[in-house]
Structure formats: structure tokens, C-alpha cells
Image (spheres, rainbow, N blue to C red):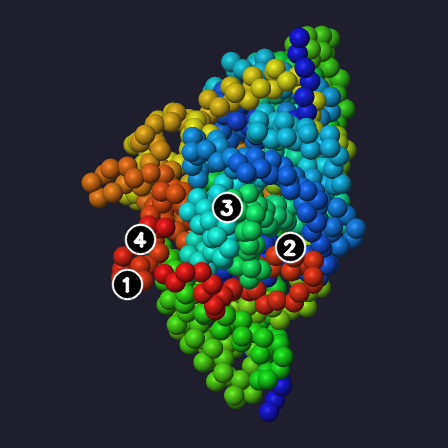
Amino acid sequence: MSTTPPIAEVPRRILDPDLLLQPTRLQSLPASRISAGRSLLEKMQREAWTFELVHFDIDAHANGEALYRVHAGDGKIFDFVIFSFEPTLEGRTGRITGQNWDMMGALIEGPTTAEDRAITRTELPKLYAGRAVPGTLTWARSNRSFRAFDHAVQALAEGRQPDTRALWEVGYLMRNTGLDGNGTFLTRSFLTLEADHPLRLPLHAQLLSAFIMREFASDLVETMAKHRNEQAVVLDREVRRMIGIGNGSALGLLFFVNTHPMLIGTWLEQRQTLLAEATQLPLVQHAETTVQYRELLERASEFTRVDPYVYARFDDPHRVSEQLDRAIEVLDELLARGATSGAELLGRLDGVIGDEAWELVAANLLELLPYERIVEAIEGGIRSEQFVAEADMPLTELRAIIERDYSWALQIDMEAPGAREYVWYKSADAEEPRRGPASEVSGGRNWALDLPSDVQALDAAMRATDHANVGGLLREQPELRATIERIQSLRDFRYHSPHMNMLGDDFVPVSIVRFMNSAVHGLLRTVDEGDDRNVLGLIYLGAPTAADLNEGLELETRYPQMPVTTIGAAR
Amino acid sequence: MTTEMRASAREMRHMVGRYLHARSCPGHAVNAIRDAIMAAQAEGVDAVSEMERVRNHYDGARTSFDVSRDGDTVVLDGRGTPAILLAPALIDELSLAVIAGAKCVRVVSTPGIGIAAALGEYAAVRGVAFEIEQSAGGADAGGDTAILTPTHTPRTPVRPAESAAGPAMRRILLEGYVMDADQFWRLFHESNEALTPDSELSRRHAGSQLYDEDGNLLGEVSEETYLHLRRDENDPERAVLA
């Protein structure tokens, strides 16, 4: 049997920006090996990072302080200092407008001094008015899930494990309510992280903070149980592993995408390029990598099959599971005939299974690539996002960029009914991003990025002008500056802007929110709430624990499965 | 008595941009003017105070020059518009003047034009270098005329790994801006005028409130009040409370 797969082209939908950048397509991209959460975890595992609980002084009311120390692979140290508070209900919401948190923490290049921690304790609660100590990378906040948290404390205090199924369904003991860095609160600008800085890749500092918050949540549950009963038991390792950190995201991620087109463009290009490479690798029956790939598809199928949520705008996970089973059948058929490739498999599945299942089949091909290739590809994602006008650029060159990258924007009818239904604004209430019908909103400004109207106005102006270069056109029509600067500055990127009219009544914001949470950040169970704005999800659900990393355990935790044994009371 | 504080480049970018929006600076020019203010401040000029000083000039301001030619000199007439508002257009015109082979550029009727002396890095990012000769009075005294001699220069990369837009901006990225704390927070709060007033209707636009079939408010999104959409074991069509 041949070990050389037949020639199959990279599926067009992998590399064609016009196909990839549709919001409904972006929402289907799953967490993968190059999502921030996964790539950090793989880095920590391969470089043998270890975690140390330096102290944990938290009283029976949950007030106190803890300090976690991370020993990164190259000898660098990071401290995560935590301030814990007794929960109160006043001012408590899951939204950014909330003002009350059960824990606040700071990730600081360490080792920190007692003075660093004392200053941080004073400054953290001030938020925007607070000033982080030098070397601070993030400030983080989280709240308990009362239901799951109290249940777990009570169970441990009674000498038994919590109900596994209940924890599996909720998925977390504490949920993230804010992870800020990159200059906010005078944290360190990620633009200045050294070339050998262990957390230099986009979002790694935030995800390390989330990983430690997850660890803290389990430690806090155990400590509270111990305060209740000296004989309390601790969480089984498998249960600790199962628990993630909760997360809720909404319209703010639309603004993030609009203001970080270079980061998005770089990341998507890296992802799709790696994917294209991976589709060309041979898949051979009984070969170790092929067997592992097939097992991952099986795990993904099982993971989606037992997903406990109903989704509104996204594919039903049970249907995704069935389609993944079909994909495995097709893979087996191809392997039985001889060597095949991801390209051939994906080609056979195109139009046969839905987008989410197809993207899972594709994303798992990334596991076939050498780690070194992944690392090489995902370097360089941090960008200044500064737009710069080039007055001397010939308009013919600008025209060529528009024709290559913005034909979609020229084709949208912005005068059609509903095309300008919504405005996007930031509320004076903690700057919360909101979207409402234009007729219902007054005051403030519309923060939407209206690329279709902007590009169409530029196109019309270019047709009418006698000037030969950008500077001349800007002298004549200075109101085109922002549009021109953006287009010029993004000309080296192919995947920078979703093809969307975010003002339109047919635009579904959760498509972009989920893309960020799932594909970029690496969250699992990213469920929408039916309001088209909010997406819940879980960070590090089922991932290795700090103890697993310390012991160097090699565990398969991708697409985690609920522990087989029901440890707690049956429901 | 005032105290000093440090603000990161990101915080300054946020505050200055929003302040310009709040003062009704033409939206198409906000980002470019913001970057010019940040660059000038990084080079040691108090551009933030200048931004505040001309606060009544933003609404409806012109953002381009009237341009004419006087022999081998390009004449840029700002028509009384504060220079800070015309900084992006100024650099564009210097670039065009180089292409056109002009010997120098004369700026007139542009109050505060002296601030251009602190735009060296801002211009270099855009491929232009220049020397400036101000009229008597200077920027601080409100001088509105200057002679600039532009030349082409290789563009300074803005990518942080390469140069981060020049040494002054790189220093700011590392150390932040030293600001008068009272001024920074005064402008920070004033910039919030660009935000939209809160209301019950507005809160619905966040999508984070839940109502029953009769329109009664059930609560806001959070694990405590959220009607989780998980399936009930005995009735797959039914959503149950978490």
C-alpha cells in the first residue's frame, strides 16, 4: 500500500480571505493548538514550568492573601499575588459594570518583595486610578459561582467529593470578571517584552493569570472546607482537572477586533498557513500520528455529544458530534485505500458536513505539525496597531489594495432597508459596550467601524479626483483620512477585518465574540445566550493542574471527558 | 499643590483620543491628531496642555491647509486653525513638497506652529525629515508662522521589534508619560463626555438583562440569575435553572 498520498490541493476555504472572513465562518473556528490558552499550556509543558504555592493565608471568611510563584522554563520567575475577600452581594454582577469581586490578583515579574505586594494591595482596588508596580503584567479579578462553590465546600467538609456531574455541567468554581494588562493601570506594555520573555506572545500573560486563578479556586474551596471541618477531604486530582474558569464576553470584543486588525490579521495568517501545511502531510493507516489524529476526532465527537447546553446561533453540538462520526468514517475509508492527506479528507467532507464539524476536522490537523514549526509560526503577533498615512502613495496603488481586499465592502448596499439599523456606543455606566437601534440612542458617539460606507466613499472620491497620489486627495477631501490610513496600514495583511456591516439588522455580533473566545483565546463550550450579544465559555476546562505540570505527567486533556465514575451523589 | 503620576502609552492614547471625540474633533482626524500629540509629548513638548488650551477650536475645525505655490516655496495657510489640528496634514504636505521639488515650505496663519519642532519622530515614521525656523515669538507665545525645509528619509518602522516609532516613543513605552495628576484625571473624566448616558432602555442594549414572557425583569447575566440553557435530563426541550 502506498505511503504517499495522492495530490490534493489545499481547500480554497482555508486560504481565501473572502471565504474565511465571513462572520458565520469565523464563528465556527474552534479552539486549537495555536489558540492562546492551548499554546501557553503546550509551552509550559514542554519547557517544564513549575508552580509553587508560597503562602496561602486566608481565614474562615475568605479574607486574606495568597502568593503563587511560577518558575518558567528558562529560570525566570513570575509571582501571582492574590487578595481574597468575603463575598457580598452588593454591586455584584457578571458584567464589567460590577464593582465587587471575591478575588483580585496581579501577575508580576518576580520574585516580588513584600513592598511590591503591599503597594499592589493598595492600588488594585482603585482600578483605573490605580498604578501597578513595575514589572506587573496583568491585573485580574474573579467571582465565585455560588452554587458550585458552596456545593463543593459543603461536600469536602462532609468528607466526600462534590457531585461530578453538577461540576461538569457548571464547569467552574470561579469566573473571570476582568483580565487587564498591556499598559492598562500602568501594567507593562507587551510591546516592550524582550525577545526571550516567556510571556511575549499575545495573550499568554492573561492566560497564565487565568490558569492560576483556576488553581486558586480549587485551593480556596479546600481551605474553606477545612475551616468548616478540620477533617475535610481535598478535591480528587481528576475533579480539580475537570474544573475550568468561567468567562462571559460580549460586545467589547467587537471593538477589540476593530482596533486590533494587525493582531487579528497576523494570527489568522499564521493559523491558516499552518493549516495549509498540515493538510499536505500524509495520513497513513496504523501510523502513530494518524492514530492519534483519529483518536482526537473521536474525543471531539464525544465532547460535543455530551455538551449540556442548547445553542442559539451556533451549530447544535449533538449534530456536530454526528458529523464528526461521519468524518471518521470517511477517514477510515480513505485510509483503507492507502495513504491520504488532510486535504483529501477535507475535500471529501466539503459540503457534506457543517462548518463547525469541518473546522474541527481541519483544526486537529495542526497536531501533526512539529512543535518547533508551531512556535516559529506564531512569533511576532504583537503589533503597535498604529495607522500611518503615506501621502506619496500613488492612487493607482491604493486602488489595487481596495480591489484586492475590499470588494466585499463595495458590494454591500448601505442604502437598503435595515442597513443602518443599529448604532454602537459605550455607556457612561463603566463604559459598557452596547448596541441599539439608532432611533433609541441619543448622546455620545457611534463607535462602530463602518467599513462598507467608508470604502464606498473613498472609491467614489478616487473616481472623481484629478490628483495622482494620496496626499493630494487628502488635501482635497481630508474627511477620508481615517479610511485611507487604515487601508494603507493594513496592506501587508490579508485577514485583518471581518467582512461585516456591523450596523445592519442582519449582523449577528456573537459570531465575532465567539471567534475571539473560541479560536483566538481557546475557550471551550462557548455558548451564546440567545440575545446575539453574550457568549459564555470555559477557560482551561479539563486542562492539567499545576500539580500535573509539576510532576510532568503526560495526560491527554484535549476535548476533556467527564470522569467516568460518578463520585458524588447521583442526580 | 499638584502631584506627578505616570500614565502608560496605552492610557494616554485612550484618554487623548476620547478627549478629542468628546470635544467634537472631526472623527476622521482624531487618531492621526492623537498620535501627533503623543509623539510631541514624548519629545518633551507639553502637547497635552496645548490640546486642552485649544479646546474650543475642535468642533467643525478644518483639517487641511489652503495650499499655494510661491516660486520654489510651498505656502500652507492654516486660516487660523491651531497647529495641533493640522499636524497630520502638515506632514502630508511636507511629503508632497519633497516630491514636487520645492525648496521650502512656509506655514502661515497657523497658531502654535512651533509644536512642529517636536514632530520629528512622527514625521520620520511617515518618511519625512525637516528643519524648522520659527518666526519671532515661537510656539509658546502663539507664533503662527514658520519656514520648514523637508527632505525624504527612510520610514521609521512602527513595529516594536524594530524601532517602536523612534527612540522617544520607545522610551515612553518602557517608562510611560510623567504627567500632572490633576490634569490627567481632569481630562480623563472630561473625555467621558464621548460616552452615552445610561438608561434602562440602554441597559437592554447590552443584552445582559433577562425578561420573562410578560416582560418582567428576571435579572442580569451571571451564573446566579442566568437561565442556563442546559437540557433537562427528562425533557430535552426544556431549559432549567443552573
Type of the residue with mark 2: Ala
Residue highlighted by disc 2: A546
Q: What residue type is labelled 3?
A: Met
SS assignment at label 2: helix
- Which type of secondary structure does the marked residue at label 1 adopt? loop
What residue would you read off at disc 4?
Answer: B240
Q: Which of A44 and A122 is in front in this view?
A: A122
**Observer-nearest of A287 and B193:** A287
Given contact means CB atoms under 8 Å apart, are the residues at marks 4 and 3 in contact? Answer: no
In percent of width and height, residue A510 lies at: 41, 49
Q: Distance between the residues labelled 2 and 3?
A: 17 Å
Q: Distance between the residues labelled 1 and 2?
A: 37 Å
Identity of the residue drawn at 57% across and 70% down: A365
Residue B175 sits in quarter: top right
Q: Mark 2 lies on which chain?
A: A
Whether label 2 touches label 3, CB < 8 Å: no
Identify the residue under disc 1: B234
Q: What residue type is labelled 1?
A: Asn
**Residue position marked by numbered label 3 in the rendering:** A174
Residue at image coords 61%, 67% = A555
Are the two marked residues, 4 and 1, in contact with CB atoms closer than 8 angstroms?
no
Dot 4 crowding, Cα within 10 Å, few <14, some 14–19, many 20+: some
Q: In this view, does A284 lie above or below A50?
A: below
The local secondary structure at tag 4 comes to loop
- First of labels 4, 1 by sequence position: 1
Asked whether the residues under the numbered discs 1 and 2 touch, taking CB atoms below 8 Å apart as contact, a structural biologist would say no
Task: Examine the rendering and report whether any part of residue B27 can be seen.
Answer: yes
Mark 3 vs mark 1, CA separation in Å: 28 Å
The answer to whether residue A47 is left or right of residue A247 is right
